[in-house]
Amino acid sequence: MSKYESVAVFSVKEGEEKAKSLVEKFKALIEANGTMEAVDEWGQRRLAYPINYETDGYYVLYTFEAEVSFPAELERVYHITDGVLRSIIVAK
């Protein structure tokens, strides 16, 4: 098991409730495949530059421990999920 951090920026175009549902979706995915250490919701903030014509995003930092193969799966799910503007996963 290795320790990881992931920051995701979710779209708030459809409302903050939709972004919070995505937070819970990814929290459940991480808990199903590893050990969640912390979920730090930074909330809605202005983006440094527009992404898909959006100027605001909902930022979340996930800190977790998982098998080495899981970050690739998490990144795959980030890329196919509507409402995820940007994401990054790093090993601690």
Image (spheres, helix red, strand yellow):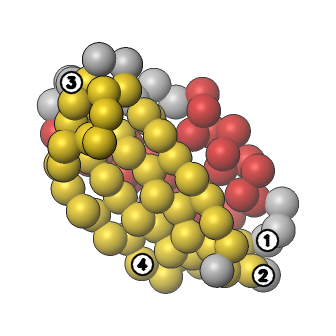
Q: CA distance from mark 1 to mark 2?
A: 5 Å
Of mark 3 and mark 4, the one earlier in the sequence is 3
Please state which of residues 89 and 24 is positioned toward the viewer in this rendering. Answer: 89
Q: Is residue 83 visible?
A: yes
Q: Callout 2: 10 Å neighbours few (<14), some, many (20+)?
A: few
Q: Amino acid at mark 2?
A: Met
| Element under disc 3 | loop
| Element under disc 1 | loop
- Which mark is drawn over residue 14? 3
Quarter of the image with the C terminus is bottom right
Residue at image position (24%, 62%) is: 42
| Element under disc 2 | loop
- Which mark is drawn over residue 1? 2
Q: Position of residue 63 (x, y in %)?
A: 50, 74
Q: Amino acid at mark 4?
A: Ala
- Rendered view: 83 above or below 62: above
Q: Amino acid at mark 1?
A: Glu
Residue at image position (64%, 66%) is: 90
CB within 8 Å, label 3 to label 1: no
Quarter of the image with the N terminus is bottom right
- Which mark is drawn over residue 67? 1
